[in-house]
Amino acid sequence: MLKYHNLKTFYIPWALLCAFLFSSLHTQAAGLPDFTKMVEQYGPAVVNISSSNNHKSKDSKRSREIPNIPEDSPLYDFLRKFLEEEERSGGDEDSLPHRFLRSQGSGFIISPDGYVVTNEHVIHDADDIIVRLTDRRELTAKVIGTDKRSDLALLKIDDNDENKDLPFVKIGSSDKLKVGEWVLAIGSPFGFENTVTAGIVSAKGRSLPEGNSNYIPFIQTDVAINPGNSGGPLFNLNGEVVGINAQIYSKSGGFMGVSFTIPIDIAMSIVNQIKDKGSVSRGWLGVLIQDVNSDLAKSFHMDKPKGALVVEIFDGPAKLAGLKVRDVIIAFDGHKITRSSELPPIVGSVPAGATVDALIIRAGKEIPIKVTVGELPAEEDMGRVTGKADTVEKTARLGVAVTDLDEDMRKALKVEKGGVLVKKVKSDAAKEAGVRKGDVILMLGSQEIADVKSFEAIADTLKAGEFVSILINRKGSPTFLAMEVPEK
C-alpha cells in the first residue's frame, strides 16, 4: 500500500508538470514571429546581382576569379578545381571570350523605376551587371554611383519593356531599431537565391577594427549571413528595411553567429546624395582619437571613462577651433560621446561649413567650444597635414631606458620634433601600461617631452601611486597609455 501511495504521489505531480510544460511551449510557439507574409510580399524585391569584368588577363590566358569565398572553404576548392578543369578543356585560348565572373551578391529594389541598392564590393570594377529577380527575369543594370567608405552602391536597371511592374521594398528606420528585436535577412548566400534567415539584433553602434568603416555605426545581429548575402536587406517585423547586410566576422569564411549591417538611415542618406549629385560629402573634424579606459580616466581626473581622447590634430577644423592633444570630447552637436567610435558617424553627418557646439574635458574641467565642421577629404587626399642619438641609455624612474632622436631617426619614425626613443622597458609598471621598445614618448601627463633631460626631470616630479598619461608614437601612429607611477 505504501509503495502504491508513493507511486501515486509521484505520478500526479509529474503529469501536472508535463501539462504545464506543454502549455508553456505552446504559448511560446504561438508568440514566435511568422515571416511568411513578409517574405511573400517583399521577397520579390530582393535580387541576386552578378557582375563580370571583360578585361584580358596580363598573362594572355583565360582569366577567371573565384567569387568572394574564403580560400579555406570547401566550396573554394570545388570551384577552383572546376575552373581549372574548364581551362584545360576550353580549347584555343585566343578563341575564348576574355570574360570572367568577378562577384556575386545581393541587392534590393528601392523604387518602381528600378533603382537598386547593394554593396560597393559586389560590383567593384564591373563592366557588366546582371540583376536577377525571383520571377526569373534577368535585367541589365548600370552603376549610378558608389561610396567606398560606406561600401554602398546605387544601380539603375536599364529602361526596357521587361522592367515593368518592378517590386520594391518599404524603407524603415534603423534609429528606432532596438536590441533584442526580431529581424529577417533575404539574400543569395553562396549563390542560393532568395534564401531567408532570421534572428535578433544583438547590438547597435558597433565599430569594426578593420576596413574603411569609421563612419558606419554597424548593427550587429545573429542572423545567418554568408558570402553572397552582401548587399541584401535586413527587415524588421513590419516588413521595413532597417539595414544592408555587409560583413561577417569568421575564421572559416562562413557564419559564426555574428554579422554586421549598415543602418538604413545612414545608407539612404548616402544613396540620396549619390542620386542627387553623384558623390558623397561628409563632415570632418581633423583629429585622431582613441577610447578612454579606467586608468586614463584617473590620469585625466575624470570620474569615469567616457568620450573620445584626442591623440593627434591635423591642419583642419579641430586645430582652428582650439582643440589640443589630450582633450577628451564628451559631446558633439547635441550627442553625448561615450566611446570614441561614436564620434566619426556624428561628425560625418554634419554638413560641411556648419558650426556646432562641443563639450570637452581639459585638465579635469568641462569646457564648451564651437567647431566649424570641414568636408572630409577624398581618400587619395587624406595624407596628414601637418643631433645623433645618445650612446648612453638613461633609465628614468618610470623604468624605461630612453635616448634622444637624430634627424634620420625622426624621418624613419615620422616624428617631427621632441620625444625620446624607448630602448628598453625594465619596470613592471611600464610593461603593464603597454610601453614597448621602439616607442617614442612625446608627452608625460600634460607636458611635452623635448629630450632625455626633460623626460627625466618631469618623471622625477611624479607622485608614486598616481596614474599618468603617456603619449607615444608607435610606428607613425600616436596613442595614449596610462601608467601607475612606481615607487622611487
Image (cartoon, rainbow, N blue to C red):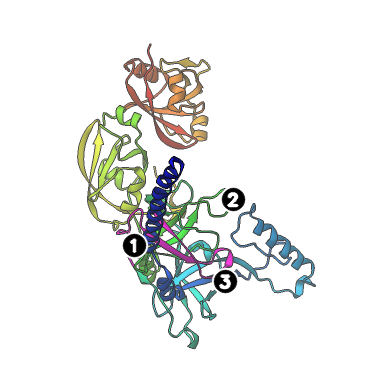
Give the mark toward the camera: 3 or 2: 2
Callout 1: few (<14), some (14-19), or many (20+) C-alpha neighbours within 10 Å? Answer: some
Task: Write down the residue under mark 3.
Answer: 127
Quarter residue 86 falls in: bottom right
| 12 or 208: nearer the viewer | 12
161 w.r.t. 418: above or below: below
x and y, in percent, of residue 273 in the image:
36, 66
Quarter residue 320 falls in: top left
In the picture as drawn, the residue positioned furthest to the top comes out as 488
x and y, in percent, of residue 82 in the image:
72, 64
Residue type indicated by callout 3: Asp
Give how far apart the Cα atoms at labels 1 and 2 are.
Answer: 31 Å
What residue range appears in magenta?
A: 172-201
Quadrant holding the N terminus: top left
Give the mark toward the camera: 1 or 2: 2
| 184 or 440: nearer the viewer | 184
Give the mark toward the camera: 1 or 3: 1
Residue type indicated by callout 1: Asp
Give how far apart the Cα atoms at labels 1 and 3 are.
Answer: 29 Å
Q: Secondary structure at mark 2?
A: loop
In the picture as drawn, the residue positioned furthest to the bottom comes out as 161
Quarter residue 111 falls in: bottom left
The numbered disc on residue 265 is: 1
Residues under numbered marks 1 and 2 in contact, where contact means CB atoms less than 8 Å apart: no
Quadrant holding the C terminus: top left
Callout 3: few (<14), some (14-19), or many (20+) C-alpha neighbours within 10 Å? Answer: some
Q: Secondary structure at mark 3?
A: loop
Give how far apart the Cα atoms at labels 3 and 2 are.
Answer: 30 Å
| 11 or 4: nearer the viewer | 4
Task: Write down the residue under mark 2.
Answer: 252
Residue sitting at 51 percent across and 15 percent down? Answer: 392
| 44 or 149: nearer the viewer | 44
